[in-house]
């Protein structure tokens, strides 16, 4: 696969790893946060941690829209399906998120709710047009990458005058979340790990460009490297961050230049602005309420807004008291420092946002990294096959 | 977040759609968000939509820089 | 003087336009006609022909091995096969994984009222062809019909019996530290072929299901290496799940080499597109073999000599591990755990 395989080359990876080891000063630690769940997943899946020197540590941020989706929002979707009899269309990622009363969308399906997995927002509209006698609701989640498709579908629904389609909108914004990690009331109680820089989201940035990050690179004096998703991209970005730290720079650099520009996809941005507006505040699971961090559907599209159409009222639902996601998302604690990690909370029975999707810090660690929790003596001898 | 895959445009189709190819697997996706695409260009695709084109020159430059980093690291004595 | 009784007019089954209806499952004439004109005609063999409720079968000496599977695959027809051939191959393989030579199959059908007879004939013909090619006849069966809406077209349950020679005791608990782990070919083909036809996920690919009977490959492997420890076919949950099962049963760990695991380019691409990991995608014509290290070369040669094993590869080794982790050295040179599958692998967006 072009533009994939070349960026997974093991030899080049070794070279980049050697460069990082050489340039990371042994006199200090480097702690970088990868904001984006896709990067968390890439790091875990390819075992990138093993290629980094011990004084370079990656902290897994909140950047998974499934992880940060509050239980209360999933409840809204479940209720629509179970009690209002709508056809509830959802991306696969969201189907297993556990919500209140031991339910998830998948479990609601088993109870008789008409829940359908879709790969694309357009599929949901297709279903609506094919079943005009039923109400169809699309459960929209995602960061800025996933928002333009939803905007397109809303525009199309309006121009085609589809009378039975609406969207339950949970689109959230990346820069707001990054700021929240760096500075929020919780920081006072939880403390925060000194972060030396950010591995910035790849595909979000294709839409919003690199410009929005310049603000906090300046304000908070942290380097940001916008990074592609392949393992070589991540390694190169870490090298670039190490260099910025060593040279005392706090710039926004674009490692993913083959796709990302400073201005981003203007057409997509205009489309989103036409259909959505900022919510004053929105709850992020694990982060609490974050101001100006999410989108709502504009009044011009009110009839396609499931919240207005069905008169939905949001009820916040707190996480399990033992859940340490708030601290883990900020890098203050590691998954293994959470009392319920691996016991009550596992990928099969997730209790909090970090375990809910395979990109959450806890899920990634549980699925890919638990061997690191053992004392070295217990590790199996590496044998060449 | 944002699983997106590099895909080659096979042909453009009506209604802002295109047939794309990822390693031999073909799918119809929307190109409504990217203007002026031509067959054999590459785009990244997310949830059935092309989001941006891939710049081959930038990709080559990135790869070259990655390979060079390794060589330079070895050369630093 | 009595006139000869007029013979009943035997109206043939309308295989072109006819549909399954409740009479076909009632046990009366309609059932008999369905069985004779469709099933017996396709499967025809000396043990089925008497059409008794049970088949009376000779078996060679050895221990009896029995396996059963229910098949509910959707879509019913997919690239590279259908529910019928899948059912035959699947049960043959289960029996073969015990090191046994499969001898006979039984097939139970639950048909949904309204299912087109033409499709049913296609499924049955496919089963018959698979059974014939494998040399394992369907000797007895059953048919029931459920009301429209209460079935998914066709469900098939197949049971297979075979015999295993004395001295062969394959089992998931047999793996030992140092053993070699083989896979017989590329992984993920079947799951991708199925997904390519699922609603809402449609993509064009030339990937075919790898559904195939593995009993002759097994016989060749056992001939080359009677000391094989474990044979298992990685169906639902894929290679990763099957290896985790074996690790747990045997109380060992494993270390795999990602670069050694064969994945067809089209499968890799489809998985990339959908956000799936080929390690967890179903296979229906592949097997895992765990063998003592000294027998590695002989086993690899036996694999490669067989049409179903040409792309066989040594993918890892059994290790000592009290946590029973299946680990993998990634193509990048890092390390990760290859965990059990969590829930159903659903295509990801993020």
Image (cartoon, helix red, strand yellow):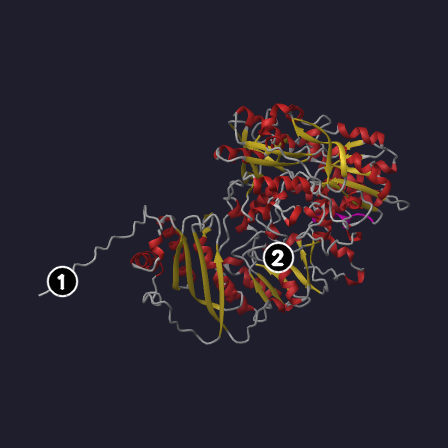
Q: Nearer the viewer, residue A311 or A119?
A: A311
Distance between the Cα atoms at labels 1 and 2? 66 Å
Q: Is residue A46 magenta?
A: yes
Q: Is residue A181 magenta?
A: no
Magenta stretch, main secondary structure class: helix
* Marking on residue A118: none
Which residue is pictured at 30% across the width and 56% down the height? C30
Residues at badges 1 and 2 in contact (C-beta under 8 Å)? Answer: no
> Which stretch did the figure color magenta?
A45-53
Residue B32: x %, y % from top left: 58, 27
Crowding at label 2, few (<14), some or many (≥20) Cα neighbours within 10 Å? many
Which residue is pictured at 56% across the width and 30% down the height? B39
Crowding at label 1, few (<14), some or many (≥20) Cα neighbours within 10 Å? few
Q: Is residue A87 above or below residue C86?
A: above
- Farthest-out residue, left: C1
Residue A193 visible in the shown view: no
Q: Is residue A116 above or below residue C187?
A: above
* Marking on residue C241: 2
Q: Nearer the viewer, residue A364 or A129?
A: A129
Q: Which residue is mark 1?
A: C4
Residue C286: x %, y % from top left: 54, 57
Chain-order first, disc 1 or disc 2: 1
Residue A21: x %, y % from top left: 83, 46
Q: In terms of secondary structure, where does tag 1 sit?
A: loop
Query: Please, which chain is the residue tagged with disc 1 on?
Result: C
Residue A316: x %, y % from top left: 71, 40
Q: Nearer the viewer, residue C166 or A1?
A: C166
């Amino acid at each position: 696969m072009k533009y994939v395989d070349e960026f997974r080359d093991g030899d080049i990876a070794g070279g980049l790893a050697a460069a990082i080891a050489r340039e990371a000063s042994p006199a200090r630690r480097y702690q970088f946060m990868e904001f984006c769940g896709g990067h968390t997943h890439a790091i875990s899946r390819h075992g990138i941690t093993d290629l980094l020197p011990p004084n370079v540590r990656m902290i897994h941020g909140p950047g998974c829209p499934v992880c940060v989706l509050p239980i209360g929002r999933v409840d809204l979707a479940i209720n629509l399906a179970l009690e209002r009899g709508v056809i509830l269309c959802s991306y696969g990622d969201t189907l297993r998120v556990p919500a209140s009363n031991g339910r998830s969308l998948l479990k609601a399906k088993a109870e008789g709710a008409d829940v359908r997995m879709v790969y694309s927002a357009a599929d949901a509209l297709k279903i609506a047009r094919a079943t005009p006698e039923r109400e169809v609701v699309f459960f929209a989640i995602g960061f800025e990458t996933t928002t333009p498709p939803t905007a397109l579908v809303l525009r199309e629904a309006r121009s085609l005058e589809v009378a039975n389609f609406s969207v339950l909108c949970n689109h959230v914004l990346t820069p707001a979340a990054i700021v929240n990690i760096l500075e929020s009331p919780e920081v006072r109680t939880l403390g925060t790990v000194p972060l030396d820089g950010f591995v910035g989201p790849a595909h979000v940035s294709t839409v919003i460009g690199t410009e929005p990050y310049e603000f906090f690179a300046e304000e908070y004096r942290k380097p940001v490297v916008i990074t592609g998703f392949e393992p070589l991209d991540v390694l190169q970005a870490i090298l670039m961050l190490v260099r910025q730290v060593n040279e005392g720079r706090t710039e926004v650099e674009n490692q993913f230049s083959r796709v990302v520009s400073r201005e981003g996809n203007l057409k997509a941005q205009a489309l989103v602005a036409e259909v959505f507006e900022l919510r004053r505040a929105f709850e992020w699971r694990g982060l609490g309420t974050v101001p100006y961090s999410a989108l709502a559907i504009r009044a011009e599209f009110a009839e396609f807004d499931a919240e207005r159409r069905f008169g939905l009222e949001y009820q916040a639902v707190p996480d399990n008291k033992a859940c340490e996601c708030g601290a883990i998302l900020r890098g203050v604690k590691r998954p293994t420092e959470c009392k319920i990690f691996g016991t009550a909370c596992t990928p099969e029975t997730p209790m909090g946002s970090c375990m809910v999707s395979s990109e959450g810090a806890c899920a990634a660690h549980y699925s890919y990294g638990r061997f690191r929790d053992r004392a070295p003596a217990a590790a199996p001898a590496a044998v060449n096959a | 977040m944002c699983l997106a895959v590099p895909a080659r445009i096979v042909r453009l189709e009506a209604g802002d759609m295109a047939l794309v190819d990822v390693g031999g697997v073909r799918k119809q996706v929307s190109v409504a968000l990217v203007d002026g695409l031509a067959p054999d260009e590459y785009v990244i695709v997310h949830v059935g939509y092309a989001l941006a084109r891939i710049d081959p020159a930038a990709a080559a430059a990135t790869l070259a820089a990655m390979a060079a980093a390794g060589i330079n690291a070895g050369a630093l004595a | 003087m009595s006139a000869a009784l007029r013979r009943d007019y035997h109206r043939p089954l309308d295989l072109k336009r006819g549909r399954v209806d409740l009479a076909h499952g009632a046990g009366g004439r309609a059932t008999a006609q369905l069985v004779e004109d469709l099933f017996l005609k396709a499967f025809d063999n000396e043990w089925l022909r008497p059409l008794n409720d049970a088949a009376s079968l000779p078996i060679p000496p050895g221990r009896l091995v029995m396996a059963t599977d229910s098949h509910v695959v959707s879509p019913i027809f997919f690239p590279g096969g259908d529910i019928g051939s899948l059912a035959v191959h699947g049960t043959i393989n289960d029996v073969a994984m015990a090191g046994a030579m499969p001898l006979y199959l039984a097939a139970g059908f639950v048909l949904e009222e309204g299912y087109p007879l033409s499709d049913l004939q296609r499924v049955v013909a496919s089963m018959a062809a698979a059974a014939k090619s494998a040399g394992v006849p369907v000797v007895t069966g059953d048919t029931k019909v459920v009301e429209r809406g209460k079935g998914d077209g066709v469900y098939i349950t197949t049971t297979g019996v075979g015999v295993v020679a004395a001295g062969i005791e394959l089992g998931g608990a047999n793996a030992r530290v140092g053993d070699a782990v083989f896979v017989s070919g590329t992984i993920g083909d079947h799951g991708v072929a199925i997904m390519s036809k699922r609603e809402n996920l449609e993509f064009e690919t030339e990937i075919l299901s790898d559904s195939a009977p593995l009993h002759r490959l097994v016989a060749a492997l056992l001939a080359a290496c009677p000391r094989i420890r474990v044979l298992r076919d990685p169906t639902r949950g894929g290679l990763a799940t099957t290896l985790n099962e074996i690790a747990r049963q045997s109380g060992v760990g494993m270390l795999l080499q990602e670069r050694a695991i064969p994945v067809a380019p089209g499968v890799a691409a489809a998985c990339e597109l959908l956000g799936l990991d080929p390690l967890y995608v179903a296979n229906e014509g592949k097997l895992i073999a765990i063998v003592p290290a000294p027998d590695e070369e002989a086993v690899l040669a036996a694999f490669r000599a067989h049409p179903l094993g040409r792309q066989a590869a040594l993918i890892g080794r059994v290790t000592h591990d009290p946590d029973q982790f299946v680990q993998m050295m990634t193509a990048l040179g890092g390390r990760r755990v290859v965990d059990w599958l969590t829930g159903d692998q659903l295509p990801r967006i993020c």
